[in-house]
Image (cartoon, rainbow, N blue to C red):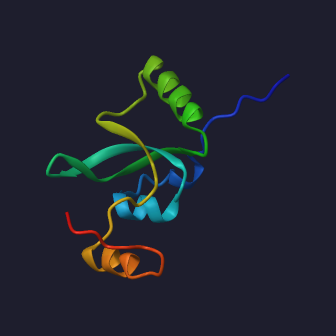
Amino acid sequence: MTERRTPSSRPHATGERLSVAEVIARHHGKWVLLHITAEDRGWPSEGVVLAVSSSRKRISNFVQQRFKDGTLPSPNCIFQAIRHIKTVGEWREMLSRPGLEHVDA
C-alpha cells in the first residue's frame, strides 16, 4: 500500500500566532497555508500556520481535502515563504555591490 503524503502540520499543533515575517523566517522557501488572524492595509500580517510543504501541489491537495471535510478555517492564504520586499538600506547596499549599476529613470 502506498503511503499518502500530506503537508506537515506537526510543528504547529500549539496554534501559535505568528507574524508573516516570523513564518517566512521559520519556513523560508516552503509553501505555507496560513489561517489569517490579522491584516495590515488589506495584507495578511499575522496568522496560524496550518500546513507547510516544499510542494505547492501538496498544499493545494491539503486545502481541497480540508475544504471537502469542512475543516478549513477562513480566511486563509497560500504563499511561498520568501522575503520579497527589502528596506531602503538593503536596496542601497545591494546596488552598491560591484557589477550592479544604479540607473535613474
| Residue 105: percent from left, percent from top | 19, 63
Give the number of marks.
Answer: 0
Residue at image position (59%, 49%) is: 10
Whether residue 28 appears in this view of the structure is yes
| Residue 42: percent from left, percent from top | 17, 46
In the image, is residue 9 above or below residue 16? above
Q: Is residue 43 left or right of residue 13?
A: left
Farthest residue to the left: give it. 41
Q: Is residue 58 left or right of residue 50?
A: right
| Residue 21: percent from left, percent from top | 37, 63
In the image, is residue 87 above or below residue 64? below
Residue at image position (44%, 60%) is: 24
- Nearest the eye: 67 or 21: 21
Q: Is residue 88 left or right of residue 3?
A: left
Residue at image position (52%, 23%) is: 65
In the image, is residue 8 above or below residue 73? below
**To which quarter of the image does residue 7 belong?**
top right
Residue at image position (46%, 17%) is: 68
| Residue 90: percent from left, percent from top | 34, 77
Farthest residue to the top: give it. 68
Q: Quadrant location of the N terminus? A: top right
Whether residue 19 appears in this view of the structure is no
Q: Is residue 61 left or right of residue 16?
A: right
- Nearest the eye: 35 or 99: 99
Farthest residue to the right: give it. 1
